[in-house]
């Protein structure tokens, strides 16, 4: 169990319990020049819950950017090339494959036995090791040598909300802490001017499940993800009220600080020191926030690489923002992009979402590399599940795929992973993992490992039990960590 | 043996089997058991499968227990090793692989096979000791010791004080002096009603020199309608109250009737046992009233998944399991939920017992398959709002009138003898058409989610590994072996409810008074308020906990009486100032040599600001409301949701009435640690973050409160010094010190100066509420001053 440095806490408490008594009757004027008191409030920042904390062992990465493709992208249309499935296109699915399996929308599948569906998309090999990508992701394919593609990943629940919850919290039941919360709880965040765990969102709607996906569960609320807005102020309530000039705001904050310091001296309650520190940070955020979203210093070339359009909320915008957040020390950034739920039609709608996502994803990896951040940042691209090798006929003349949890694919980049390789594999239909499945808990264990955290030791006691992100499961994927 | 011979022997064999069932085999078998099997069972099985633990319901300490088996059925069948679960498990041939640490040696497996084949010979000597864990303090009956004697008897105001003081005296720690009157007034007002005292109340209390002025104040607060709001909100945390379904779609649903029931019940001091019974099983009481049905909304606050393509049974089971876990946390203070997939690791709660409790809740008439989707909130009851009732009445009247007219028309036709072809009569056709059209326009009426059991009962069985698809053995509604038994006539929720508050149940009253204590002191006497099990914290003052628990029952479960007892105690009335001497001995203030400073709860931050500003709409109850919300806060939901920001009185309602969307809760609540309503919350954390600072400094709502406060100050006082003192009094509940006053004075002067130089900014900051101000720069400067006082630690903290 990780704890706030007890020595620090002790010193802080001790300091205030002593100085609180001693300074009770000291005049405010002298308080304000009292260096000891001032530096004590600074100590409160340093010992705050989001301050960087030492991991269990030397970390390989400092940051994570998780590009969450909400809805369940079809591995069979994007990464997992299955000639055999194409060969068997339109054949009835063998009973042996379906036996004992459960799917979403069971009723549609039980009315008529589903037929296998070979992809209509062209695949090609890219990079030094010939990784497969379909024509839908030309830009991603172009950085094949930076990517580690992972096949044969499975999950536990075939409905969107619960499956997203599982991918983020390791449980399909709502209410557990999310990965970003666990990580900031475990190692804090290098940035003291921005939240440690930031959530960005693009696409036609929010992700199913909403706030539960970045919740802190039973961890202290300070670790929950902070959703940033895609237009206007990134952080809610970041801007001064209308009519309050920068000078007036500064005077307001100074007055609050001075009166709070006096109260600190009067009561000896170290929570006041923490509050003073929090106001300090809020003030800095008001400066760092606008600077963060000001893309004017980015080169035209950079903006074009991402496909950023000024003032337009988009996945491209969020990718660039993610790079800038990491550059400014934010620990965990999660981007949600919705609309991957292609039940009815794998043609135009899939083209559209791929076009929105493909280029910015590539640009993010390249840009991180150029900024010298890729080695210390892990980028993850993937959704809550994949899609069935069987077709789903919901609309006349169109074909889609159902939710599929047995095997799907995602990719990672950066963090010194074995780039240009594929890890794991699915069977010839893309239905099941070929060998051992790669479980979500394994991915979580691996991500924590890269951050220098032992997933069996990152625990929090709640209701008498030490809880973990990986529950009672999870193996670090040595293929990834070396 | 040939088949025919076997047939001849069959009756004999059956007899033999029956004999083997009834009693041990020959003495040679017993010797084999003693030499080989007993040590093996001891070393490999009994660690978990003993009568205390009964892992997966199975005990292996006696032949009877093994035969009776556990959650998967019989442990072994005498004479039939291949069909015996024990042998399958040690062979590791199926999904059950035992022992969990690793396979037995082949010769051990063979010995077990042989033993089962021999018919399970057993010796009489006992194999295992009786249940562990039953001596744990929390499972013992409530003991009522007389309050102890103390040296400093003059300090004592209530029996509570004796318990606290005796312990402090043992540590040679004197209690803190009583807090000053203003601190006390603000503290007890916030604790009992969630609202700071108004200036008139402050003046009245200061002027009241009677010796029992404080007690009179407490009486006034206990009878305030806001008491029910404050303590109702504490209860709603436990009830995981929200105004939407949660999960994926997160549709709005009507739960506020239940919220209002809670407020009313608390305001009229409904005895806590009745409060519990009506919420768990109000529908099963004889001739339940509408109120009692609404009360059952308690367990309908579970999140519901209505996403397309789901297995309805899975989420129904989730809700039922949550009710079991909530019952454990809220009433029993036990982590019962931990026994859902396997026996509890620490406490004497078996998986089977989890499903016995599950069985009480399993009969709710909730939908479990796709065909019933249109009825997804079932069970519900119609409760029209007053407007809806009027509309519905109008509709009914109109319907009656049209029907009557139709009947008269038909009669007339009949009289005229024109009934031969009524279908062709244009007048009749017209009337029928009108009636049909009217029927289609029947106004919709609000439905509330309630509990109702189904007509055909569901099967109750253990879910192996917590998986609803893996059926274990059948179970009946029942309780925990470690606690007094549940008297189950019909095995209904009503039996469970009555047991929860029965005089023999030691946990409910302890857990309840402990949680109340936590609200008054920041921490419970048992710090782990939701875990009274063996892993939980021991009570700091066990005798006091039991005394209070006993007092609660003795005082007819009156919540107000216990609250009165606590807030009039000397320990509650202490100063909260941090003390050096106490900090050395008791750094976490567990012994309560002082009170504790507590940051206000999320809703109360809003309420206190509203009260200071004079904008507060004090109305109690009604549908949830939509105060201003930061732009973009609702953009994270899957289905686009509307937030029709209130413009009238509802804009200034108390925080507990803010509409709670589970997938996008109001940031003003979440930033200050309001629970997310996915699970029962028995204690809120209190964080202290920059996002809180940003909210108080810049949020539209708080700027508006500042404008309201400015307007009030300019209206209610005529000179700046008085205004300043009043501002501080309204925000912090005390007048400013001279140093504070000076500092604020100079701030005000600087602001006024700046706004006079730039009147444009003054108009902007003055906003709607200041639009009519005669002197805009002055109004803006006071708004600035109001912002400062509403951001002070003093404002945010209950001393």
Image: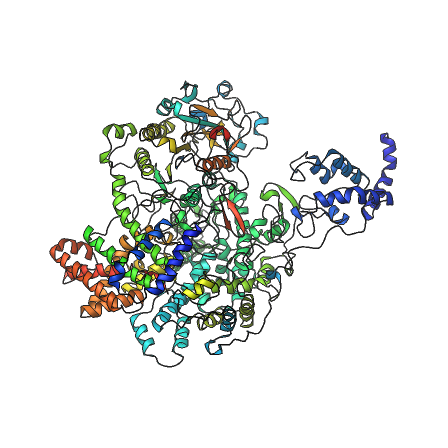
Left or right: where does residue B565 sit relative to residue B617? right
User: In the rendering, at what x and y percent does residue A308 appear?
Assistant: 27, 32
- In percent of the image, x 30 and y 36: which residue is there? A324
Q: Is residue B662 above or below residue B331?
A: above
Q: Is residue B618 visible?
A: no
- Using the image as rendered, state which of residue B433 and residue B234 is in the foreground: B234
Left or right: where does residue B496 sit relative to residue A316? right
Q: Is residue B668 above or below residue A347?
A: below
- Name the outermost residue toward the bottom: B210
Left or right: where does residue B486 sit relative to residue A169? right
- In percent of the image, x 36 and y 60: which residue is there? B604
Image quadrant of residue A411?
top left
Left or right: where does residue B506 sit relative to residue B82? left
User: In the rendering, at what x and y percent does residue A435 appear?
Assistant: 55, 26
- Name the outermost residue toward the left: B757
- Using the image as rendered, state which of residue A404 and residue B534 is in the foreground: B534
Q: Is residue B453 above or below residue A346?
A: below
User: In the rendering, at what x and y percent does residue A383 appear?
Assistant: 43, 34
Q: Give the colouring mode of the picture.
A: rainbow
Image quadrant of residue A129?
top left
- Using the image as rendered, state which of residue B131 and residue A159 is in the foreground: B131
Task: Report the number of discs.
Answer: 0
- Using the image as rendered, state which of residue B248 and residue B452 is in the foreground: B248
Q: Is residue B118 above or below residue B330?
A: above
Q: Is residue A6 visible?
A: yes
User: In the rendering, at what x and y percent does residue A5 appear?
Assistant: 43, 49
């Amino acid at each position: 169990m990780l704890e706030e440095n007890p020595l620090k806490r002790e010193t802080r408490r001790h300091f205030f319990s002593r100085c609180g008594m001693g300074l009770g009757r000291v005049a405010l004027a002298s308080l304000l020049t009292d260096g000891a008191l001032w530096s004590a409030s600074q100590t409160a920042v340093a010992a705050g819950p989001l301050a960087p904390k030492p991991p269990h062992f030397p970390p390989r990465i400092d940051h994570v950017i998780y590009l969450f493709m909400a809805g369940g992208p079809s591995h069979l249309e994007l990464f997992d090339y299955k000639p055999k499935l194409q060969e068997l296109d339109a054949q009835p699915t063998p009973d042996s494959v379906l036996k004992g399996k459960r799917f979403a929308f069971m009723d549609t599948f039980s009315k008529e036995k589903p037929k296998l569906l070979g992809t209509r998309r062209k695949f090609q090999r890219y990079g030094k090791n010939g990784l497969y990508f379909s024509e839908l992701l030309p830009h991603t394919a172009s950085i094949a040598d930076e990517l580690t593609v992972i096949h044969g990943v499975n999950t536990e629940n075939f409905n969107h909300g619960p499956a997203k919850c599982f991918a983020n919290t390791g449980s399909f039941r709502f209410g557990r802490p999310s990965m970003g919360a666990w990580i900031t709880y475990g190692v804090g965040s290098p940035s003291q001017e921005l939240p440690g765990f930031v959530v960005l969102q693009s696409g036609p709607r929010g992700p199913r499940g909403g706030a539960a996906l970045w919740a802190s569960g039973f961890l202290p609320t300070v670790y929950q993800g902070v959703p940033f807005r895609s237009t206007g102020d990134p952080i809610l309530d970041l801007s001064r009220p209308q009519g309050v000039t920068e000078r007036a705001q500064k005077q307001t904050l100074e007055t609050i600080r001075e009166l709070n310091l006096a109260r600190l001296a009067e009561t000896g309650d170290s929570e006041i020191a923490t509050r003073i520190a929090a106001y300090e940070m809020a003030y800095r955020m008001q400066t760092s926030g606008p600077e963060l979203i000001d893309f004017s210093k980015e080169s035209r070339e950079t903006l074009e690489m991402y496909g950023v359009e000024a003032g337009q909320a988009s996945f491209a915008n969020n990718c660039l923002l993610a790079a800038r957040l990491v550059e400014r020390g934010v620990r965990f950034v999660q981007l949600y992009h919705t609309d991957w739920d292609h039940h009815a039609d794998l043609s135009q709608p899939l083209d559209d979402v791929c076009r929105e996502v493909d280029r910015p994803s590539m640009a993010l990896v390249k840009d991180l590399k150029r900024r010298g951040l890729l080695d210390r940042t892990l980028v993850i691209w993937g959704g809550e599940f994949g899609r069935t090798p069987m077709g789903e006929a919901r609309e006349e003349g169109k074909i889609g795929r159902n939710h599929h949890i047995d095997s799907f694919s995602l990719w990672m980049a950066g963090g010194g992973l074995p780039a240009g390789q594929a890890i794991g594999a699915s069977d010839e239909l893309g239905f099941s993992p070929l060998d051992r499945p790669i479980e979500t808990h394994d991915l979580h264990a691996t991500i924590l490992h890269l951050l220098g955290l032992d997933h069996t030791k990152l625990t929090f006691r709640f209701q008498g039990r030490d809880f973990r992100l990986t529950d009672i499961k999870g193996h670090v994927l040595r293929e990834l960590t070396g | 043996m040939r088949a025919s011979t076997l047939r001849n022997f069959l009756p004999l064999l059956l007899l033999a089997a029956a004999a083997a069932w009834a009693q041990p085999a020959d003495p040679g078998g017993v010797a084999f058991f003693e030499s080989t099997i007993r040590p093996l069972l001891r070393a490999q099985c009994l660690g978990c499968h003993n009568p205390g633990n009964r892992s997966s319901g199975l005990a292996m300490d006696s032949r009877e227990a093994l035969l009776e088996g556990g959650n998967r059925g019989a442990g072994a069948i005498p004479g039939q090793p291949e069909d015996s679960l024990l042998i399958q498990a040690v062979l590791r041939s199926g999904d059950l692989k035992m022992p969990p640490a690793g396979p037995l040696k082949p010769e051990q497996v063979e010995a077990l096979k042989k033993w089962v084949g021999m018919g399970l010979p057993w010796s009489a000597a006992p194999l295992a000791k009786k249940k562990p864990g039953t001596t744990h303090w929390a499972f013992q009956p409530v003991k009522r010791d007389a309050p102890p004697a103390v040296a400093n008897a003059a300090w004592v105001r209530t029996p509570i004080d004796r318990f606290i003081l005796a312990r402090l005296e043992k540590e040679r720690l004197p209690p803190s002096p009583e807090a000053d009157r203003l601190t006390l007034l603000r503290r007890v007002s916030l604790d009992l009603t969630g609202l700071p005292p108004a200036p008139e109340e402050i003046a009245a209390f200061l002027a009241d020199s009677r010796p029992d002025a404080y007690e009179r104040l407490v009486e006034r607060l206990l009878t305030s309608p806001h008491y029910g709001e404050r303590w109702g909100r504490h209860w709603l945390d436990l009830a995981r109250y929200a105004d939407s379904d949660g999960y994926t779609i997160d549709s709005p649903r009507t739960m506020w009737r239940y919220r209002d029931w809670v407020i009313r019940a608390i305001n009229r001091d409904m005895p806590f046992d009745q409060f519990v019974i009506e919420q768990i099983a109000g529908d099963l009481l004889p001739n339940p009233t509408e109120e009692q049905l609404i009360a059952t909304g308690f367990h309908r606050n579970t999140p519901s998944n209505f996403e397309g393509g789901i297995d309805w049974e899975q989420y129904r089971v989730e809700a039922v399991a949550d009710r079991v876990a909530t019952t454990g946390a809220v009433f029993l203070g036990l982590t019962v939920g931990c026994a859902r997939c396997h026996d509890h690791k620490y406490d004497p709660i078996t998986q089977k017992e989890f499903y016995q409790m599950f069985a009480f809740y399993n009969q709710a008439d909730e939908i479990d398959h796709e065909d019933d989707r249109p009825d997804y909130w079932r069970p519900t009851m119609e409760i029209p709002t007053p407007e809806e009732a009027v509309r519905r009445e109008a509709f009914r009247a109109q319907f009656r009138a049209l029907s009557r007219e139709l009947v008269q028309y038909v009669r007339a036709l009949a009289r005229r003898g024109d009934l031969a072809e009524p279908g062709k009569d244009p007048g009749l056709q017209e009337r029928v058409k009108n009636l049909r059209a009217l029927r289609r326009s029947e106004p919709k009426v609000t439905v509330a989610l309630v509990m109702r059991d189904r007509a055909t009962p569901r099967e109750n069985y253990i879910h192996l590994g917590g998986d609803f698809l893996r059926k274990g053995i059948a179970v009946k509604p029942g309780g925990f072996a470690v606690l007094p038994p549940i008297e189950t006539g019909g095995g209904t929720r009503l039996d469970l409810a009555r047991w929860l508050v029965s005089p023999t149940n030691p946990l409910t009253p302890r857990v309840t008074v402990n949680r109340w204590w936590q609200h008054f002191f920041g921490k419970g006497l048992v710090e782990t308020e939701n875990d009274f099990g063996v892993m939980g914290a021991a009570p700091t003052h066990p005798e006091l906990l039991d005394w209070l628990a006993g007092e609660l029952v003795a005082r007819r479960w009156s919540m107000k009486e216990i609250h009165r007892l606590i807030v009039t105690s000397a320990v509650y009335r202490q100063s909260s100032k941090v003390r050096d001497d106490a900090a050395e001995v008791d750094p976490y203030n567990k012994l309560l040599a002082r009170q504790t400073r507590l940051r206000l709860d999320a809703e109360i931050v809003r309420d206190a600001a509203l009260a200071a500003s004079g904008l507060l709409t004090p109305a109690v109850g009604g549908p949830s409301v939509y105060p201003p919300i930061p732009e973009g806060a609702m953009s994270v939901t899957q289905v686009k949701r509307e937030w029709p920001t209130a413009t009238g009185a509802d804009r200034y309602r108390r925080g507990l009435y803010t509409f709670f969307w589970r997938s996008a809760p109001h940031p003003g609540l979440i930033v200050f640690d309001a629970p997310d309503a996915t699970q029962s919350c028995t204690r809120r954390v209190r964080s202290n973050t920059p996002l809180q600072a940003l909210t108080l400094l810049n949020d539209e709502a708080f700027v508006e409160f500042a404008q309201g406060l400015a307007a009030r100050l300019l209206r209610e006082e005529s000179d700046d010094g008085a205004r300043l003192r009043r501002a501080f009094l309204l925000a912090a509940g005390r007048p400013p010190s001279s140093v504070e006053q000076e500092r604020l004075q100079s701030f005000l002067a600087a602001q006024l100066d700046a706004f006079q130089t730039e009147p444009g900014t003054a108009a902007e900051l003055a906003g709607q509420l200041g639009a009519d101000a005669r002197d805009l720069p002055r109004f803006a400067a006071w708004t600035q001053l109001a912002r400062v006082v509403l951001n002070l630690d003093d404002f945010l903290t209950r001393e």
